[in-house]
């Protein structure tokens, strides 16, 4: 697996669906992260978000405002600057039908692999150690491999993942370069 191909670089085009949030801390774009079961009247603070520039808080689906904070949903296309998305196009979109996660390097279910359960646990433990700094929002050992959902693949994640046996780790990043996302969609 070429994990480096999933790393966003300045100038890359990104396109994703998510929740736009404007609060006192700035404008944010958050992917399909788990939502607390307690429904609140306020705008939930983003937990796994990236900063956005030039997002419209008028052109969003399911718009909600509370004490100046605003949230809603949209599909956003823009340019990754290295730390944020410069929005070029935005479409108000309610949550699309749930597609199965697009895990990268997911192993076939019918094969036996040469690693042990302990090795899979070591991969899981390493991901858990980096939970916050790698912006991971779900993870677990599924059968004989580890699956994780995260905001985006960072260079450090790509470098570490490249050292692992093929198939022991399956990653589902929310933000990827648009060219890579379209290749994965057309290959499916």
Image (spheres, grey):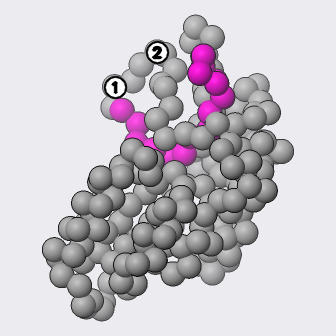
- Where residue 129 appears, as percent x and y from the top left, is 30, 52
- Residue 9, picture quadrant: bottom right
Instruction: Report which residue position mark 2 lands on.
Output: 41
Task: Please say whether residue 174 is one of the residues in the magenta stretch.
Answer: no
- Residue 50, picture quadrant: top right
**Quick one: 78 or 12, which is closer to the camera?**
12
**Quick one: 16 or 91, which is closer to the camera?**
16
- Where residue 41 appears, as percent x and y from the top left, is 46, 15
| First to last magenta residue range | 22-36
**Residue at left 34%, top 25%?**
38
Q: Is mark 2 on a helix, strand or loop?
A: loop
- Where residue 163 appears, as percent x and y from the top left, is 40, 78
**Residue at left 29%, top 68%?**
123
Task: Check the image and name the residue furthest to the right.
Answer: 88
Q: In the image, is 92 to the left or to the right of 188?
A: right
Instruction: Report which residue position mark 1 lands on.
Output: 38
Q: Residues within 10 Å of mark 1 (few under 14, many from 20)?
A: few
- Against 41, is 114 above or below? below
Task: Please say whether residue 30 is one of the residues in the magenta stretch.
Answer: yes
Question: Can the viewer see residue 73 in this picture?
Answer: no
Quadrant in which the C terminus is drawn = bottom right
**Residue at left 40%, top 84%?**
166
- Where residue 122 appears, as percent x and y from the top left, is 23, 68
- Residue 20, picture quadrant: top right
Q: Residues within 10 Å of mark 2 (few under 14, many from 20)?
A: few
Separation (CA) of disc 1 from disc 2: 10 Å
Q: In the image, is 64 to the left or to the right of 14?
A: left
- Against 111, is 21 above or below? above
- Against 169, is 136 above or below? above
**Residue at left 49%, top 26%?**
45
**Quick one: 181 or 7, which is closer to the camera?**
7
């Amino acid at each position: 697996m070429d994990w480096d191909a999933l790393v966003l670089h300045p100038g890359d085009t990104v396109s994703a669906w998510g929740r736009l949030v404007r609060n006192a801390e700035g404008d944010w774009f958050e992917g399909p992260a788990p939502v607390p079961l307690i429904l609140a009247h306020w705008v939930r603070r983003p937990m796994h978000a990236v900063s956005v520039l030039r997002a419209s808080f008028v052109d969003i689906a399911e718009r909600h405002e509370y004490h100046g904070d605003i949230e809603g949903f949209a599909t956003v296309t823009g340019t990754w600057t290295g730390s944020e998305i410069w929005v070029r196009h935005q479409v108000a979109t309610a949550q699309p039908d749930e597609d199965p996660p697009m895990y990268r390097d997911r192993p076939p279910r019918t094969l036996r692999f040469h690693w042990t359960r302990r090795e899979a646990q070591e991969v899981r433990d390493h991901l858990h150690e980096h939970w916050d700094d790698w912006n991971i929002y779900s993870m677990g050992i599924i059968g004989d491999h580890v699956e994780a959902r995260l905001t985006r693949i960072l260079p450090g994640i790509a470098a570490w993942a490249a050292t692992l046996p093929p198939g022991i780790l399956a990653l589902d990043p929310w933000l990827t370069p648009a060219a890579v996302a379209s290749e994965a969609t057309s290959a499916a």
